[in-house]
Image (tube, helix red, strand yellow):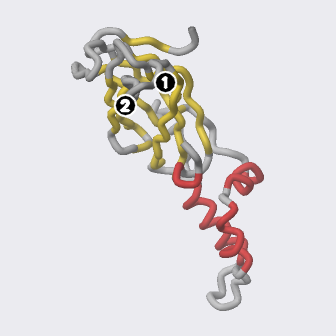
Amino acid sequence: TDGVVALHPGATIEFPIDVEPPSEDRARRAVSFDHVGRLAGMNGSASGVPASTKFNELLANEMKLMCAKLSYLQSYAGMGRVGLTCHGTCQCAAHVLDAHAPPKRKERAVSIVTRANIQLHLKDVRRGWRHKGRGDTCRMRLRLLNETSSGGHQFQLKHLFLVLTGCSTLPA
Protein backbone atom coordinates (compact mmCIF):
# COMPACT_ATOMS: atom_id res chain seq x y z
CA THR A 1 0.00 0.00 0.00
CA ASP A 2 1.04 3.60 -0.50
CA GLY A 3 1.69 5.80 2.47
CA VAL A 4 2.89 5.40 6.04
CA VAL A 5 1.19 3.21 8.64
CA ALA A 6 1.35 3.69 12.43
CA LEU A 7 0.09 0.93 14.72
CA HIS A 8 1.16 1.79 18.28
CA PRO A 9 0.24 4.88 20.34
CA GLY A 10 3.13 7.30 20.54
CA ALA A 11 4.38 6.51 17.04
CA THR A 12 5.41 9.81 15.46
CA ILE A 13 6.23 10.96 11.97
CA GLU A 14 7.66 14.39 11.36
CA PHE A 15 8.49 15.70 7.93
CA PRO A 16 9.47 18.97 6.29
CA ILE A 17 7.05 20.90 4.13
CA ASP A 18 10.01 21.57 1.89
CA VAL A 19 9.02 23.67 -1.10
CA GLU A 20 10.77 26.54 -2.78
CA PRO A 21 9.03 29.90 -3.04
CA PRO A 22 7.24 30.07 -6.40
CA SER A 23 8.49 32.14 -9.28
CA GLU A 24 6.76 35.53 -9.57
CA ASP A 25 4.79 34.37 -12.61
CA ARG A 26 3.65 31.18 -10.86
CA ALA A 27 2.80 33.09 -7.70
CA ARG A 28 0.72 35.62 -9.65
CA ARG A 29 -1.33 32.75 -11.09
CA ALA A 30 -1.82 31.36 -7.56
CA VAL A 31 -3.60 34.50 -6.37
CA SER A 32 -7.21 33.45 -6.08
CA PHE A 33 -9.68 34.72 -8.68
CA ASP A 34 -11.74 36.72 -6.18
CA HIS A 35 -8.94 39.30 -6.00
CA VAL A 36 -9.34 40.27 -9.66
CA GLY A 37 -12.01 42.86 -8.82
CA ARG A 38 -9.87 44.42 -6.11
CA LEU A 39 -6.86 44.53 -8.42
CA ALA A 40 -8.78 46.11 -11.29
CA GLY A 41 -9.38 49.29 -9.30
CA MET A 42 -5.74 49.73 -8.27
CA ASN A 43 -4.41 52.53 -10.44
CA GLY A 44 -2.25 53.96 -7.66
CA SER A 45 -3.26 57.57 -8.27
CA ALA A 46 -5.12 58.10 -4.98
CA SER A 47 -2.32 56.97 -2.71
CA GLY A 48 0.65 57.77 -4.91
CA VAL A 49 1.68 54.10 -4.76
CA PRO A 50 2.05 52.34 -8.12
CA ALA A 51 -0.51 49.63 -8.85
CA SER A 52 2.30 47.07 -9.29
CA THR A 53 3.46 47.76 -5.71
CA LYS A 54 -0.07 47.23 -4.41
CA PHE A 55 -0.31 44.00 -6.40
CA ASN A 56 3.01 42.80 -4.96
CA GLU A 57 1.81 43.58 -1.42
CA LEU A 58 -1.40 41.63 -2.05
CA LEU A 59 0.64 38.79 -3.53
CA ALA A 60 2.95 38.68 -0.49
CA ASN A 61 -0.08 38.50 1.81
CA GLU A 62 -1.57 35.65 -0.26
CA MET A 63 1.67 33.68 -0.21
CA LYS A 64 1.76 33.70 3.60
CA LEU A 65 -0.88 30.97 3.48
CA MET A 66 -0.59 27.48 2.08
CA CYS A 67 -2.96 24.56 2.26
CA ALA A 68 -1.66 21.10 3.13
CA LYS A 69 -4.18 18.50 1.99
CA LEU A 70 -3.60 15.23 3.84
CA SER A 71 -5.21 12.05 2.53
CA TYR A 72 -5.62 9.21 5.01
CA LEU A 73 -7.47 5.90 5.29
CA GLN A 74 -10.71 6.03 7.22
CA SER A 75 -12.28 2.69 8.12
CA TYR A 76 -14.99 1.04 10.20
CA ALA A 77 -12.71 -1.05 12.47
CA GLY A 78 -9.33 -0.96 14.16
CA MET A 79 -8.52 2.68 13.42
CA GLY A 80 -7.16 5.36 15.73
CA ARG A 81 -6.53 9.07 16.00
CA VAL A 82 -3.48 11.25 15.37
CA GLY A 83 -2.62 14.65 16.75
CA LEU A 84 -1.25 16.99 14.09
CA THR A 85 0.94 20.04 14.79
CA CYS A 86 3.19 22.33 12.75
CA HIS A 87 6.35 24.15 13.79
CA GLY A 88 9.51 25.70 12.43
CA THR A 89 8.90 28.38 9.82
CA CYS A 90 5.14 27.78 9.80
CA GLN A 91 2.22 27.40 12.16
CA CYS A 92 -1.11 25.60 11.96
CA ALA A 93 -3.98 25.00 14.33
CA ALA A 94 -3.55 21.72 16.21
CA HIS A 95 -5.84 19.04 14.81
CA VAL A 96 -6.98 15.57 15.81
CA LEU A 97 -7.72 13.35 12.81
CA ASP A 98 -9.93 10.34 13.54
CA ALA A 99 -9.48 7.45 11.12
CA HIS A 100 -12.50 5.57 12.50
CA ALA A 101 -15.76 5.92 10.58
CA PRO A 102 -18.39 3.47 11.82
CA PRO A 103 -21.08 2.63 9.30
CA LYS A 104 -24.33 4.48 9.62
CA ARG A 105 -27.43 2.49 10.36
CA LYS A 106 -28.31 0.02 7.60
CA GLU A 107 -25.22 0.98 5.57
CA ARG A 108 -22.47 -1.35 4.51
CA ALA A 109 -19.15 -1.01 6.37
CA VAL A 110 -16.50 0.40 4.03
CA SER A 111 -13.02 1.89 4.10
CA ILE A 112 -12.36 5.11 2.20
CA VAL A 113 -9.56 7.57 1.66
CA THR A 114 -10.59 10.93 3.08
CA ARG A 115 -8.87 14.29 3.16
CA ALA A 116 -8.21 17.01 5.73
CA ASN A 117 -7.27 20.57 4.75
CA ILE A 118 -4.65 22.06 7.06
CA GLN A 119 -4.08 25.81 6.78
CA LEU A 120 -0.37 26.67 7.07
CA HIS A 121 0.67 30.16 8.11
CA LEU A 122 4.18 30.86 6.86
CA LYS A 123 6.23 32.99 9.22
CA ASP A 124 8.61 34.69 6.79
CA VAL A 125 7.68 34.60 3.12
CA ARG A 126 10.29 37.10 1.98
CA ARG A 127 13.08 34.81 3.16
CA GLY A 128 11.42 31.73 1.73
CA TRP A 129 10.20 28.65 3.53
CA ARG A 130 13.68 27.31 4.11
CA HIS A 131 16.09 29.56 5.99
CA LYS A 132 19.40 28.79 4.33
CA GLY A 133 22.24 27.94 6.69
CA ARG A 134 20.01 27.50 9.74
CA GLY A 135 18.26 24.29 8.78
CA ASP A 136 14.86 25.76 9.69
CA THR A 137 11.93 24.70 7.61
CA CYS A 138 8.20 24.30 7.97
CA ARG A 139 7.65 20.93 9.69
CA MET A 140 4.51 18.89 10.25
CA ARG A 141 4.25 16.27 13.01
CA LEU A 142 1.67 13.50 13.35
CA ARG A 143 1.61 11.51 16.59
CA LEU A 144 -0.61 8.45 17.09
CA LEU A 145 -2.72 9.13 20.17
CA ASN A 146 -3.60 6.66 22.91
CA GLU A 147 -7.31 7.26 22.34
CA THR A 148 -9.68 5.47 20.04
CA SER A 149 -13.36 5.10 19.29
CA SER A 150 -12.87 1.76 17.52
CA GLY A 151 -10.71 -0.22 19.94
CA GLY A 152 -7.73 -0.04 17.56
CA HIS A 153 -5.00 2.47 16.88
CA GLN A 154 -4.04 2.11 13.21
CA PHE A 155 -3.54 5.27 11.17
CA GLN A 156 -2.47 5.29 7.53
CA LEU A 157 -1.31 8.53 5.93
CA LYS A 158 -1.69 8.14 2.17
CA HIS A 159 -0.64 11.44 0.54
CA LEU A 160 0.24 15.05 1.20
CA PHE A 161 -0.62 17.70 -1.39
CA LEU A 162 0.46 21.33 -1.08
CA VAL A 163 -1.54 24.17 -2.60
CA LEU A 164 -0.16 27.70 -2.89
CA THR A 165 -3.38 29.30 -1.64
CA GLY A 166 -5.26 29.20 1.60
CA CYS A 167 -7.63 26.33 2.35
CA SER A 168 -10.73 28.53 2.52
CA THR A 169 -11.07 28.62 -1.28
CA LEU A 170 -10.72 24.85 -1.73
CA PRO A 171 -13.17 21.98 -1.46
CA ALA A 172 -12.36 19.30 1.11
Classify mark 1: helix, strand or loop. Answer: strand
Kindly identify the residue that appears in the image at 67 percent across and 72 percent down.
Answer: 53
Q: Are marks 1 and 2 in contact (CB under 8 Å)?
A: yes
The x, y position of residue 104, in whole percent, is: 39, 29
The x, y position of residue 142, in whole percent, is: 37, 25
State the mark number for residue 165: none
- Type of the residue with mark 1: Tyr
Kindly identify the residue that appears in the image at 53 percent across and 20 percent down.
Answer: 158
| In this rendering, position of residue 47 left or right of residue 102 | right
| In this rendering, position of residue 121 left or right of residue 81 | right
Relative height, residue 139 to residue 147 (above, below)? below
Kindly identify the residue that appears in the image at 59 percent across and 33 percent down.
Answer: 161
Report whether residue 27 is seen: yes
Report whether residue 141 is seen: no
Number of numbered discs present? 2
Relative height, residue 144 to residue 94 (above, below)? above
The x, y position of residue 171, in whole percent, is: 58, 46
Classify the position of the C terminus by image quarter: top right
| In this rendering, position of residue 22 left or right of residue 132 | right
- Type of the residue with mark 2: Leu
Residue that numbered label 2 is attached to: 97
74 vs 13, nearest the viewer: 74
The x, y position of residue 46, in whole percent, is: 65, 91
How far apart are labels 1 and 2 at the CA level? Answer: 9 Å
166 vs 20, nearest the viewer: 166
Residue that numbered label 1 is attached to: 72
Q: Categorize mark 1 by other alpha carbons within 10 Å: few (<14), some (14-19), many (20+).
A: many
Q: Categorize mark 2 by other alpha carbons within 10 Å: few (<14), some (14-19), many (20+).
A: some
